[in-house]
Image: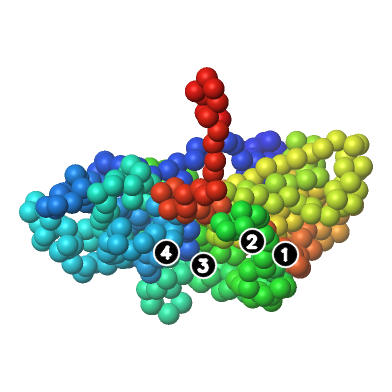
Amino acid sequence: MGLSLSSLWRKVKSWFIPSKPKPAGVNIQKSGTNQEVPIVYGFFKKSPCIKVFKATTDKKGGAKNEYLHFICVFTVGEIEGIGNLYFNDIPQSQISSERYFIKKYNGSDNQTYCTELATEFNQWKSTAKLKNIAYAYVRLKQNKDVNWWQGEPNISADIKGLKVLDIRDGQRKYSDNAALCTYDYLTNVDYGKGLAVSKLDTQSFINAANFIETTREYTRTIKRTYHDRLTREWFEETVGTFQELVVENIFSCNVNLPGDNTIKENIETLLGGMRAIMPESNGKYRIAIQKDDQPVFDFTKDNIIGAINVKGGSQSERYNQVIIKFRNKLTGEGDEVVYPENDSLHQEWKAQDNGRLLLGQFDYDTINNKAEALQMGHVIANRSRHLIGALFNGTAETMVVEAGDIVTLDSTTTGWVAKPFRIESVTLDLSTGVNSFQAVEHQPSIYPWAIGDVVEEYKDTSHALPQDINAPTGLSYETLVDGDIF
């Protein structure tokens, strides 16, 4: 049949392969003009910058090296906008505006050069417009006491990412729709794959984009723990509305794709967040989201050639607990959820697995909220417990079946009658008229939205600048006979 069952299993697990430890590069500020510029889709909180320019200037009567100038590059453009900036994770809103000057550029094709920087440095020419690069000119001011800034700060920003082509209406605009972001990355010649539109099944991307905008509903309560500077105590407060009704798209895409990643790695990241595969059919790539669909073909003894090769999932591919790691938009930091949240369900599954903990850990760089992470954990955990793979050949009439399709399968050997499967890949042999199929069991009940009430809790670790802390009061000391002070 051309492919072993073990090869099939590697294939069907494409978007839910357990994560390997990853470097924390996406959180690290970089310097230098030889750095690859990242690509930001959707909303990304505290996106680190690349400092491509750094210099100091003095003003008469001021501190030495009174002004520190930066060009901070955040992403390719054009983007929707650069929001709040952070200095060593402290938002600019908590720092006196006399200490900094910021001018932002969204990376449009017609953006002008930075006149403020050119005034300070003659070498910054009017041709330095940095077209299609989203960046900020940042100027920091030091006071005479040299305590406004303690060294060079790390700089990050909230980024509302790339404007992409909406292939449904022909308009270029901001979107966190994963199908539209993937289409943009596949077709863009500057920072993406640069595929010709003729190589893509555009209608499949339209269908996927429409499905993604199927709304999900759940209630959310956000609780923030913060430290009060006056009382020096920790307090918890509800942010916004208690059990607020949230209506959002079924998937989102909020990601900072490192510029030095391979194209393959970036495409896998974009597809993984929406549970999608991208098979090639008739010379075109099409996108297929794994969801509950109606069967499009019935495989029976009349169109199956030979035996069906069947494999059940092993314990290494089965989970009774799943951890989903993601970057939380509330904090801009790494976070994780555990599914099932309900310990009784976990214990029930664990008992079915002879008391063994079968834990899977997964990273999803496009997810930025707890509800979506829990839903992904729900799908992965439940799917892992219903995995049957099937390899079989079909007659010429089965050529209409494509990868991603839901089909039914009859087998007298296994007792299957119209058992639903999802086709993972198809090999067509035009010379013999025999088609080889690789399929995995389809469980329609696991895909609908299953998350109800969500409580998000986070600790606000934002503190004032060290030099802004009030001096202690009420101190006393005692001088002892030997001169020591306590």
Residue 473 versus residue 342: which sits nearer the camera?
Answer: 473
Q: Is residue 127 left or right of residue 483?
A: left
Label located before the other in sequence (2 or 1): 2
In which quarter of the view is residue 115 placed? bottom left
For mark 2, give the secondary structure.
strand
Distance CA(mark 3)–CA(mark 4): 30 Å
Q: Is residue 486 visible?
A: yes
| Dot in front, 3 or 1 | 1
Q: Does residue 454 appear left or right of residue 139 in this picture?
A: right
Residue found 51% across the figure and 60% down from its top: 254
- The kind of residue tagged 2 is Arg
In the rendered image, which residue does mark 3 sit on? 177
Q: In this rendering, would 316 be left or right of 222?
A: right
**Amino acid carrying mark 1 in the image:** Val
Residue matched to label 2: 224
Residue matched to label 4: 93
**For discs 3 and 4, the disc positioned in front in the rendered view:** 4
